Image (tube, rainbow, N blue to C red):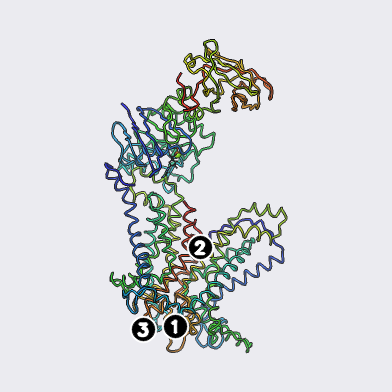
Amino acid sequence: MASIAGADMKTRLQTWLPKLVLSPSLALMLVFVYAFIAFSVYLSFTDSRLLPSYGWIGLENYTKLWRLSHWETSLKNMGIFALLYISICTALGLTLAIFLDQKIRGEGLLRPIYLYPMALSFIVTGTAWKWFLDPGIGLENVIQGWGWEGFEFRWIKDRSLAIYTIVLAAVWQTSGFVMAMFLAGLRGIDNEILKAAQMDGASNWSLYRRIVIPQLRPAFLSAFVILSHLAIKTFDLVIAMTGGGPGRATELPATFMYSYTFSRNQMGIGSASATIMLITIASIMVPYLYSELRENH
Amino acid sequence: MVFLDVDKVTKSYGPLDVLHDINIAIEEGEFLVLVGPSGCGKSTLLNMIAGLEEISGGEIKIKGKVMNGVHPSNRNIAMVFQSYALYPNMTVGENITFGLEMHGVEKSERKKAMLDVATLLQIGKLLDRKPGQLSGGQRQRVAMGRALVRNPDVFLFDEPLSNLDAKLRVDMRIEIKKLHQKLGTTIVYVTHDQIEAMTLSTRIAVMNGGHLQQLGKPKEIYDKPNNVFVATFMGSPSMNVIPAVVRNLAGVPHVEIRRHDDSTSLLKFNDMKFLERENQKILLGIRPEAITDPDGADRKSDNICYLENRIEVIEPAGADTFVSMQLGGKDVTARMRSDTEIITGADFNFAVNMQKAVAFDPESQVRISS
Amino acid sequence: MAAPMQETAIRTGKVARTFIYLVLLLFAAFYMLPLYVMFVNSVKPLAEITGGGMMSLPSVFTLEPWVKAWSSAQIGVEPSGLSPYFWNSIKMVVPAVFVSTILGALNGYVLTQWRFRYDTIFFGLLLFACFIPFQIVLIPMAKMLGVMGLAGTTWGLSFVHIVYGIGFTTLYFRNFYAVFPSELVSAAQIDGAGFFQIFRRILLPSSGPIAVVSIIWQFTNIWNDFLFGASFAGADSQPMTVALNNLVQASHGVKEYNVHFAGAILAAMPTLLVYIVGGRYFVRGLMAGSVKG
Ligand SMILES: Nc1ncnc2c1ncn2[C@@H]1O[C@H](COP(=O)(O)OP(=O)(O)O)[C@@H](O)[C@H]1O
Ligand SMILES: [Mg+2]
């Protein structure tokens, strides 16, 4: 829309103002998101350690990274965490949504209770769960105090089980949100279809399995995208609950990146790990956003 | 002097041309209706007159002044939109006076202008309401009030009645016509409804596919359509277009039409010039009201022909009865008086008013001048 | 919450309904559990907790832990309590919420009401920026804040949150304004209103609900942020979340669990309050960020 020669001042101004107003956001975005990403990706190919340095070393950081057992642990933990977190949140969210959709008395009270954890900081959540699960003062201590002397629950201190406590806290925080997404999907389904199916003699179970759940496809997709992106970004919760421990039992890529970059002065390797996180998220988000934006046009 | 001049105007969105060389000259006080199927570029043209769309080529002049590049608010035009586009957060009164306020008119003067318009449109009681609390018809009036209060040189209407129900649409149509007769302002009015076009306009511009098909008085457009598109678009039910062949019968031109059983009928043509086209194919255009029962035929016509054909479907419509039949391999509609005795499947002797018939070239679809 | 009640066509039997209520209540208890633990333990003496009474109501009620968490607990090297950090968070949050919401509103207005060629690409880039793992910008951002003279200040943190908040606020306003007919702007242009007048007089007065959504979302997100706070704050500009973590993770001295819980509630209080007051809008914001309107 090039402004035409001979246009009056007002017309010219009105064609430029919209662009002028967008330009600060455009500039911020280009510099602080995309240029920064480029810079970090570039750093991952350099010999940066404590400070950025510009000696090009090719893929060396990546090969080093893949040989680190610390990174391998983070990835393995990520796999366990993401798989359980996504599937439990989805299953729990869907179940609660279907149950809540049965004309439940007190729904207005239950929904906010399921959802409030989303409003809390992971640091707060982490603190609460950290002490609740702590064998010294938490659940184990309480139940033993109730006379059940042999009761043992020390997952948070156990190298092979600690990651599941992170899953527990993360599920606690976000499953209500997933419930809300499914509930909105359920409420969007045309009741006439359900009535028609009932007249055809479908049982409740087959009604849900054959008609309702297939119609929730968009909600499943959104839930998956949101949850997987949250999973990859999980950081605060681990810091607050276990600090990555015991040992490295709860290290995730996000905590790995942070400690390699800021405490171990291995900025090149840190950047390489951040780049891998970005690529993983992009491979999920880009197709999703692309299809959503195309639909809207 | 030409009041509003659309001169060789074109519009393209990138490689896509949506308007081709549009020329329309409008005199002061005219009511011009732009009509055409949806997507033909009517709104685009109107928006270019308003200054809401940039003009890709040509010029638009109002009172002799070139308007290209002039901001919409400086063209002294006013516009009524299909969705009414009332400002949702403002009261009716504020909606009406917003334009005056933006033009720096004194508050007391604004109030006076608002009250005048409110009286004219009988919306005095609504002034303190929000648009959300109004019915469709009331919104329509407010939208017109907002346009009227500016006392513009040209009124632009973009399908202002298409969101109203059928009854209200007819009422508002009459009201708009009255308003035009009373105020005498120049109006450009867009619609896809050919009845609105016929009833409201002093002149009609028929558009299709970004081309101006015909510009003329309603009667001209109706009786002498430039081409098959205009002929079939204007009028309801639309004009019958029947493949036919010109024959010379003792020095008088006739058209030969195939009937339902593949036998042929000859109908006399008044225009001797058709002799030049002896044995050539044409498309014969006859409006339904020119095919009637013999007693209902136009007495003033000097050329009534008779044609026997089988009745396929009968549709009583109250005042008239419409009859469908096969002619030249096409479905053809005739319009009978409602008390005519007719039977589905029976043969009937129709009267055809050939004085009103027109002919089109089958290749170019353009009317053969007569 | 957004989902309206409607008649469900599905009928369930009595046994099934009892089971459903049971499950729903069980999970309500599960979600309330940490909040309960935090509250009851923040008002009892430390000995009651260590003595195995974490789940019981306090036998001695005391506000001591709250007072201590707020004004005298050891955070890092200072026995300052959480209060200075609480104010740091406020100083960081208020300008960030304000500016990012205004920019989002303007962007949404331009993207929906003023046609221009690359709007979808622009919006796509902005939207993707909402979802990047922020680890990828930490290093250059630290450098840049230094260059801009904002390193270690709450202004610097505000700036960071504005930059990475614009995507969401723009998303909200864009989806909200998308349903306004474009004829509205045309009518206003003919009436003589300019770009900003149209925004201020016609769109903005109807934007209340979405502004609340945007403000609540931004407030919650920025208040709860830990990564940027931990990476860019100086010792005296740390936000509440970072200070709370320092308090809880401190390795020296006796672990005062009751103080930790009181501190956690203090850190959660503002967002919980916002949730209680504007929960409906909070959920709308959440949903808009996942299933686009
Ligand atoms: N901004 C645009 N970009 C590309 N094509 C457009 C744009 N606006 C309108 N068109 C096209 O121009 C043609 C005319 O549109 P319009 O004037 O709205 O038609 P009408 O009002 O007669 O229904 C349509 O084919 C439409 O698709
Ligand atoms: Mg149109």
Q: Nearer the viewer, mark 3 or mark 2?
A: 2
Which residue is drawn at the image coordinates 37% and 50% (left, top)? C116
Position above or below: A109 against B22: below
Q: Position of residue B31 (x, y in %)?
A: 41, 29
Query: Which chain is disc 1 placed on?
Result: C
Position above or below: C43 against C193: below
Residue that mark 3 sits on:
C78
Q: Position of residue C269 (x, y in %)?
A: 46, 72
Asked if disc 2 is less than 8 Å from ligand 1, the answer is: no
Ligand 1 is found in which quarter of the picture?
Answer: top left
**Residue C92 horizontal side relative to residue A114, left or right:** left
**Residue A143 horizontal side relative to residue B216, left or right:** right
Task: Find out whether the residues at labels 3 and 2 contact each other: C-beta distance under 8 Å.
Answer: no
Residue that mark 2 sits on:
C283
Whether residue B198 is visible, yes or no, is no
Residue that mark 1 sits on:
C249
Amino acid type, label 2: Val
Q: Nearer the viewer, mark 1 or mark 3?
A: 1
Do the residues at pointers 1 and 3 share their chain? Answer: yes
Spatial distance from mark 2 to mark 1, Cα to Cα?
32 Å
> Quadrant of the rendered structure where residue C240 is?
bottom left
Query: Which chain is disc 2 placed on?
Result: C
Indicate the secondary structure of the residue bearing disc 1: helix
Spatial distance from mark 1 to mark 3, Cα to Cα?
15 Å
Residue sitting nearer the eye, A251 or C161: A251
Query: Which numbered disc, 3 or 2, marks the residue that appears first in the sequence?
Result: 3
Indicate the secondary structure of the residue bearing disc 3: loop
